Amino acid sequence: MEELYTLEREVGRGSYGVVFEGHMAKTGERVAIKRLPCSNPECIELYLQELWAMRATAQNHFNVIALHSCLLQTGPRSLKTLKPGKLPLRLVESVLKGNVSGAPRSQEGSDSQPNTQRKAVTVSALKDRTNNVQSRVKPYDKTKSNERYPTTPQRPRSRGKKRPVPSEDEQQVPLRHLALWLVMEYCDGGDLNQYLLSSLPDAQRNHSVVKQLCSAMAFLHSLGITHRDLKPDNVLVCVTPKGPIVKVADFGLSKMSGGLVDGDLTRQHFSSTCGSDFYMAPEVWGGLTYTAQADIFSLGVMFWAVLERITFVEEGTTQEQLGAYVCKGRWLMPLGEALWENADLQLCIPMKFKRAPPLPPPPGPAVCTLLLEMLDSNPDARPTANQLESRVRSALKEDSH
């Protein structure tokens, strides 16, 4: 690794990987390096989906995170750069077989454990196997409110896991060194939550963020990529003298449609309930089949929160998060869940309350109308990503007059 990149410091950590700030050894260019340990087939499958989606986007759009290269680690000091367009056969074989290919027997499971007690895994190549999150929201405890933002509503800790949790058997079979390293462009502004909430509201900056996200989504959908986990945490920011450049990132739950029906991504259906509860569309909450229009709903939630500075706080944390919701007494309910329970629910845009001070000016009538269309309980009534880009610009221009 030292011959190619220098790891400087850890900048992020999750259940499934670690992100480092680093530099290219030859040029000194700053990069983000994400290490994904390939310890079980479920994780490997999601990593390969992320790699495949990022290779498809490559460095072709300003508002999508750029992948510089990918390396496969097979030993403590053994790294191999993967060729463009190629997937590591050992990892593909691990997904197909349901166990980590080439793992020593002692790592695949205890010999004293009968085969009947091991979890059988049968998968097809890059099959859709994502987590199901449908439990209800519990009321938040006012005694645990954020001292710094006493007026900010609290949200119980998210029940949904972004990626499936390995079973006990799978946790006993890690490979110490097998890992994928994704080398990506570095974003110095943090994620969208950190960037926007760390400064005073600025309507022009908010409008720029919304327009850039529309452009990114139109690009991804044109390639047949449905993100399926759009949220502020998965949007990174590069700070420039001309303003922020936002980058859609984290394609671990994304799906690629190789052959679109009549060139239309809205005809490609998915079935796995996945994503983050505050941003999931009603049809996803309901366990129905859904299309790329679920991404449009997620964008609608984000846009509403960004434009009005609507936030909540996870229980047990002090970190504000951008997200719109429905208040039911002392409960905070995700919009998608509320609309699944009542498709005729009337959303109040602008919200005018439960917003984080200081407050930006509320969105104008044209933008409010567009937000309501994006958040329609009927996926077919929402604008497509291609339509949305021009609709947003038109609505912002109309309201400016």
Image (cartoon, rainbow, N blue to C red):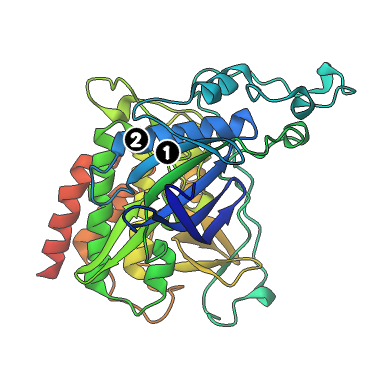
Residue 62 drawn at (x, y percent): 23, 51
- Left or right position of 278 against 375: right
Instruction: Specify the amino acid type for callout 2.
Output: Arg
Among the two numbered marks 1 and 2 on one chain, the one whose residue lies closer to the N terminus: 2
Q: Nearer the viewer, residue 359 or 87?
A: 87
The residue sitting at 54% across, 60% down in the picture is 10
Q: Nearer the viewer, residue 385 or 100?
A: 100
Residue 330 drawn at (x, y percent): 60, 67
The residue at which mark 2 appears reads as: 55
Which element carries disc 1, helix, strand or loop?
strand
- Dots 1, 2 in contact, CB < 8 A: yes
Instruction: Specify the amino acid type for callout 1.
Output: Cys
Mark 1–mark 2 distance (CA, rounded to whole Å): 9 Å
- Left or right position of 2 against 292: right
Tell me if residue 399 comes above or below residue 136 in the rendering: below
- Left or right position of 118 against 384: right
Which of discs 1 and 2 lies nearer the camera? The answer is: 1
Which element carries disc 2, helix, strand or loop?
helix
Tell me if residue 168 comes above or below residue 206 in the rendering: above
Residue 319 drawn at (x, y percent): 54, 69
Residue occupying the far right of the picture: 112
Residue 211 drawn at (x, y percent): 22, 56
The residue at which mark 1 appears reads as: 70
Residue 290: image quadrant is top left
